[in-house]
Image (spheres, helix red, strand yellow):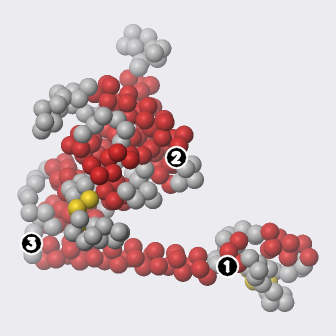
C-alpha cells in the first residue's frame, strides 16, 4: 500500500501481508490514523514477479504447442482432424498431440478418443529428482490416488469416457492439466478426490460387457459404488481451499444428479429408498 499524501508505506514492515486487493492490518490502521489520505493498493513485488513468471511460462508452452500445430498444417498432416478440433474449441495440448500422431482417424469422436489415449500414454520426465529418461506411468501413482480395485487399462478407459462424453458438456477444468497432474503426481491440477469423482462419473458410461486385455469384466455397479465411496472419503481429507477440491465437488454434483434420476421408479417417479 502506498500513501499518496505523505509517501508512507503502510505495510512497509510486513510487505507480504498485503495482497493488493484488500487492506491488511497495517493498512487499516493507517486509514484510521490518517482518514483524509488516499491509499493505493498494489500487489507485492514478489507476488507480482511470481505471477509474471507463471504467465511467461504458460505463454512459452502455448507458443511451442502452436508451432507444432502450424508445422503439421504446413506439412499437410492431420489437417482435417486439426480443423475439427479447432472448431470444437479443444485445447492446444490436445490438438498438438493429434498433430504429432501418426495414426489416421475420421470421426470427431475418434479424433477426441485418439487424442485422449495419446495424452494417457507414458512420457519421459526430467523436471524432478528422477534421472533423465525414466518413464513415469500412471501405475506408479496408482497407489496414491486410486484406492478402488481398478487396473491401469480400465482407469485409462474411464478417463477416456469422461473426456469424450462428459467434459465437452461440462467444461469444469482443463483436461491437459488433469492428465499431466495424474501422470506426474502434481497435486495442483489433480488429486485423489478429483480422480475418484471423474471415475465415478465415467462409470455411468461404461459398457457392462467391456473387457480388459487380461480378460477381466468389471462389475459396473460395484465399481461405481466404490468410486463414489472413495470420493466421499477423499472429500473429507482434501484441502477445501484447493482448486481440485472445487473441481471434484462439481463433478460429484453431476454424479449425484445422475444417481437421483436413475433411482426414480417408472410408475411413480419418486426416488426409491436404498
Q: In which quarter of the image is the N terminus?
A: bottom right
> Do callouts 3 and 1 mark residues in contact (Cβ within 8 Å)?
no
Q: How far apart are marks 2 and 1 (CA)?
A: 32 Å
Q: Which residue is labeled 3 in the image?
A: 76
Question: Which numbered dot is residue 42?
Answer: 1
- Of mark 3 and mark 1, the one earlier in the sequence is 1
Residue 220 x/y as whole percent: 28, 27
Give the number of the disc on residue 96: none
User: Which numbered dot is residue 238?
Assistant: 2
Q: In which quarter of the image is the C terminus?
A: top left
182 relative to 232 in the view: left or right: left
Q: Which of 50 and 21 is in front in this view?
A: 50
Foreground tag (2 vs 1): 2
Q: Do the residues labelled 2 and 3 touch (CB within 8 Å)?
A: no
The residues bearing labels 2 and 3 have C-alpha atoms spaced at a distance of 46 Å
Q: Is residue 144 above or below residue 271?
A: below
Figure check: 254 above or below 81: above
Considering only order in the chain, which callout, 3 or 2, is on the residue closer to the N terminus? 3
Q: Is residue 14 above or below residue 253?
A: below
Q: Is mark 1 on a helix, strand or loop?
A: loop
Amino acid at each position: 500500500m502506498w500513501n499518496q499524501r505523505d509517501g508512507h508505506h503502510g505495510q512497509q514492515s510486513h510487505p507480504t501481508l498485503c495482497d493488493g486487493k484488500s487492506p491488511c492490518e497495517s493498512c487499516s490502521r493507517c486509514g484510521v490514523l490518517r482518514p483524509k489520505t488516499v491509499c493505493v493498493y498494489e500487489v507485492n513485488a514478489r507476488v507480482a514477479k511470481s505471477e509474471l513468471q507463471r504467465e511467461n511460462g504458460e505463454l512459452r508452452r502455448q507458443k511451442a504447442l502452436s508451432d507444432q500445430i502450424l508445422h503439421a498444417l504446413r506439412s499437410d498432416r492431420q489437417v482435417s482432424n486439426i480443423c475439427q478440433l479447432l472448431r470444437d474449441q479443444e485445447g492446444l495440448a490436445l490438438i498438438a498431440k493429434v498433430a504429432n500422431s501418426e495414426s489416421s482417424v475420421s470421426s470427431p469422436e475418434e479424433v477426441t478418443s485418439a487424442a485422449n489415449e495419446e495424452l494417457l500414454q507414458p512420457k519421459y520426465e526430467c523436471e524432478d529428482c528422477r534421472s533423465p529418461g525414466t518413464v513415469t506411468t500412471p501405475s506408479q501413482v496408482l497407489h496414491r490416488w486410486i484406492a478402488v480395485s481398478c487396473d491401469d487399462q480400465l482407469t485409462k478407459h474411464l478417463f477416456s469416457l469422461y473426456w469424450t462424453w462428459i467434459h465437452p458438456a461440462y467444461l469444469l477444468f482443463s483436461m491437459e492439466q488433469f492428465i499431466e497432474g495424474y501422470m506426474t503426481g502434481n497435486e495442483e491440477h489433480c488429486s485423489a478426490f478429483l480422480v475418484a469423482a471423474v471415475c465415478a462419473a465415467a462409470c455411468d458410461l461404461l459398457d457392462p460387457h467391456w473387457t480388459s486385455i487380461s480378460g477381466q469384466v468389471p462389475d459396473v455397479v460395484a465399481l461405481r459404488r466404490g468410486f463414489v465411496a472413495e470420493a466421499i472419503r477423499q472429500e473429507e481429507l482434501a484441502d477445501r481451499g484447493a482448486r481440485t477440491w472445487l473441481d471434484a465437488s462439481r463433478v460429484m454434483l453431476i454424479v449425484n444428479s445422475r444417481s437421483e434420476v436413475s433411482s426414480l421408479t417408472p410408475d411413480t417417479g419418486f426416488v426409491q429408498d436404498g
